[in-house]
Image (cartoon, helix red, strand yellow):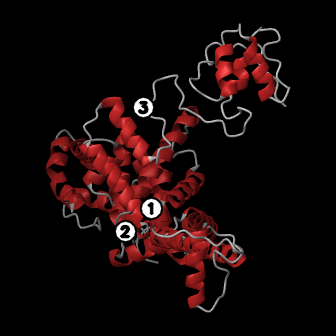
Amino acid sequence: MRPVGCRVSEAFSSRLAAAKIGEDWAIAEIWRDTHPRLFRYLRASLADGSAEDIASDVWLDVAQGLAGFDGGESEFQAFVFTIARRRVIDHTRRAARRRTTPVASDARVFQVAGPDEASPRLALDSALSLIAELPRAQAEVILLRVLGDLSVEETARVVNRRPGAVRVLQHRALGRLRSKLNPAGRNADCHSRDLQDDAPLRTQLES
Amino acid sequence: MLAGRLASPEDAGVNALVGALRLPGLTDELSGEDATVELMSRVCRESAPVAPVRRSQMKRRSRVGIAAVTVGAALVATTSLAYAGALPGAAQSTAAAALARVGVSVPGPNANAGSHPDSRGHSSSHSAANGHGQAVSTLARTTTATGRDKGAAVSTLASGGKSHAGNPPGKAKTHTATTGHGNPNPGGSSNAGGNTTRGKSGTSGSGVTTGSTASSGHNSHGATTSTTASDGHSSAGSSNAGSHSHSH
């Protein structure tokens, strides 16, 4: 299985063309490539365990809109995650009063060892829980940037914000995550250090 | 893109978190592949648009087919009518000539004419007619008459003397009784009943003249003459009530 995010752009056009006419192999490849990230996005966005049902709805919407879609792999990711975000909003509105509090994450997973050493399942669950604890807009930006592999501009279009606002939300989200993952370093100058240390991370996110 | 290359020690945790988010799909995450792919394939096949090129080709093909069928049907219908001799004369002649070239014999336009074949010809063969037109044209251009007189002169020449143009209003052209009953002028019988507006017919035959005179309604002679003219069927003059004579 290919790592998530490792995409072969050259093959995407032919795969998309085949998927448009209902070729099983092409749809399966697209689904295997995108679904894990989509599912994780939905898990982090929906705390009521409805991610699987919403994912099915999203893929159905994608299939219905595939004939009219025209673009490359990056545009396809934006297309899928835009549908997913709208589904999340709809579902959240319907279940606004039934929202459950996510289980507290265990940040020690990332303090003691990286995901290579820890159980992948435990690392993933903890990461999603940490993201879910972020304010909604910040979590959304991080999820779209990391899981959707979207650029700042693409993320801004998906969330209907200006690119500058997306950068600010991303910066704040990373600062919060650092605070959670490094509780010992939390002190008076933590915030100023986060702003300075954010430069290399931002550079990578922008790349 | 975010593969854990953060150099800062404070970013190691974030780097690990990002790496966890981007792990390959786990088994349970990919468990619903078959059902989802099957559903998506069906939806994609149903919503897949027909290729525009193919559609235009089909349209073009259907148009050509319709045109070919129409032309064929028209050809068969025309040939059938020509074979039955039911086409108009000129079309029948053309069809007979065209079909004769391909070895099909159909009747000509005069096949059923018996002793009265179509004698129509070209107008250019009628030299007399050409001269007549020229004469009329010359008269129209050179006559010194004007107004009604000019029109009457030209019309008389053009019609060979049959035209009544130029006659004063209400004054019929002089007729000569040819049957001996005065019938050529209908005014002879009808005016005998006292129709004062149509009775003044000038110098027509005896019955007509008498009828005209009788149009005043006071001359019994007109009635007598009318009776004679109508072989006794006329009731004119019997009552002077303006009734018309009966003519059966």
Judged from the image, the secondary structure of the residue bearing numbered disc 3 is loop
Q: Who is closer to the viewer here, A148 or B109?
A: B109
Q: Are marks 2 and 1 in contact (CB under 8 Å)?
A: yes
Which image quadrant is residue B111 in? Answer: bottom right
Q: How many marks?
A: 3
Q: In whole angstroms, how far apart are the C-alphas of marks 3 and 2?
A: 107 Å
Q: Is residue B37 visible?
A: no
Residue type of the residue flagged with mark 1: Arg
Q: Who is closer to the viewer here, B125 or B245?
A: B245
Q: Earlier in the sequence, mark 2 or mark 1?
A: 2
Q: Which mark is residue A37?
A: 1
- How far across and down, in percent of the image, does residue A146 sit? 34, 58
Residue at x-position 57% and y-position 36%: A94
Judged from the image, the secondary structure of the residue bearing numbered disc 2 is loop
Q: Which mark is residue B166?
A: 3
- How far across and down, in percent of the image, does residue A170 sit? 27, 47
Q: Residue furthest bottom?
A: B103
Q: Chain of mark 1?
A: A
Residue type of the residue flagged with mark 3: Gly
- How far across and down, in percent of the image, does residue B65 sit? 57, 74
Q: In whole angstroms, how far apart are the C-alphas of marks 2 and 1?
A: 9 Å
Please give the residue where the numbered disc 2 appears in the rendered image.
A5
